[in-house]
Image (cartoon, rainbow, N blue to C red):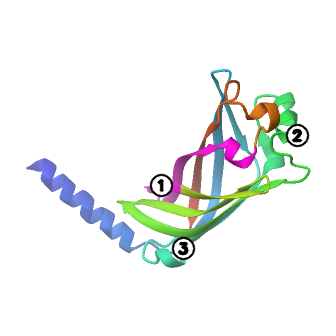
């Protein structure tokens, strides 16, 4: 009986917070990734990016996400690795210094969970991308976070002999977290 009461209170509280949601934009955030090279995880992040996120759970058709990542700001475990990934065979930052994501639709898929669909552009190649989004309430604020998989070969990252996946895996896990401000 207590479990049922707890679930009802939880559902009512969640509905209250969803109903109270207002349009919010990004305050702070992080974008990290994990790839695999020779069977070992390789982690990194981007030190510079801009995120123009307008989220209103009551008005999803007018909510959007526009994210630009400065690929020159990649942070890996070594300067040598950073220089290599910025080169022609990987990100080719001389020609493509930025990656972009522009949403076209945000759908609710569960309690405080959404699916953001849009177009992701990397190294001059644009492909549709669907990104899970979870809204959380913490310390009086809200955060948007999620995890998704990118296939580097879909965007020509690691071309030529590097396109083989026996040394560097094709799948890259991307994690993000943004703190939202009203």
Q: Is 23 positioned to the left or the right of 119 in the image?
A: left
Q: Earlier in the sequence, mark 1 or mark 3?
A: 3
Residue 72: image tag: none
How many numbered discs sit on the rendered protein?
A: 3
Question: For the residue labelled by badge 3, is the local secondary structure a helix, a strand or a loop?
Answer: loop
16 above or below 42? below
Check disc 1 and report the residue beneath it. Answer: 139
Quadrant housing residue 168: top right
The residue segment tinted magenta is 131-156
Q: Earlier in the sequence, mark 2 or mark 3?
A: 3
24 above or below 133? below
Check disc 2 and report the residue beneath it. Answer: 87
Question: Which residue is at 62% across, 63% downward?
Answer: 26
Question: For the residue labelled by badge 1, is the local secondary structure a helix, a strand or a loop?
Answer: loop
Mark 1 or 2, which is nearer the eye?
Answer: 2
Residue 63: image tag: 3
Question: Which residue is at 8% across, 50% downward?
Answer: 1
Q: Residue furthest right?
A: 94
| Residue 54 visible in the shown view | no
Question: For the residue labelled by badge 2, is the local secondary structure a helix, a strand or a loop?
Answer: loop
76 above or below 47? above
Q: Residue furthest left?
A: 1
Whether residue 11 is in magenta: the answer is no
């Amino acid at each position: 009986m207590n479990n049922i009461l707890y679930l009802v209170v939880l559902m009512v509280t969640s509905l209250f917070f969803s109903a109270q949601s207002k349009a919010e934009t990004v305050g702070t955030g992080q974008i990290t990734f994990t790839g695999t090279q020779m069977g070992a995880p390789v982690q990194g992040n981007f030190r510079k990016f801009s995120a123009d996120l307008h989220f209103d759970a009551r008005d999803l058709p007018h909510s959007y996400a526009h994210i630009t990542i400065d690929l020159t700001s990649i942070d890996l475990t070594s300067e040598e690795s950073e220089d290599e990934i910025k080169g022609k065979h990987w990100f080719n930052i001389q020609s493509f210094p930025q990656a972009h994501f522009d949403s076209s639709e945000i759908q609710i898929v569960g309690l405080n969970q959404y699916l953001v669909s849009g177009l992701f552009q990397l190294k001059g190649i644009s492909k549709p991308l669907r990104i899970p989004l979870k809204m959380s309430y913490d310390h009086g604020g809200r955060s948007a976070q999620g995890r998704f998989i990118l296939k580097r070969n879909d965007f020509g990252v690691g071309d030529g002999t590097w396109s083989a996946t026996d040394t560097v895996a094709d799948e890259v896990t991307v994690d993000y977290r943004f703190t939202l401000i009203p």
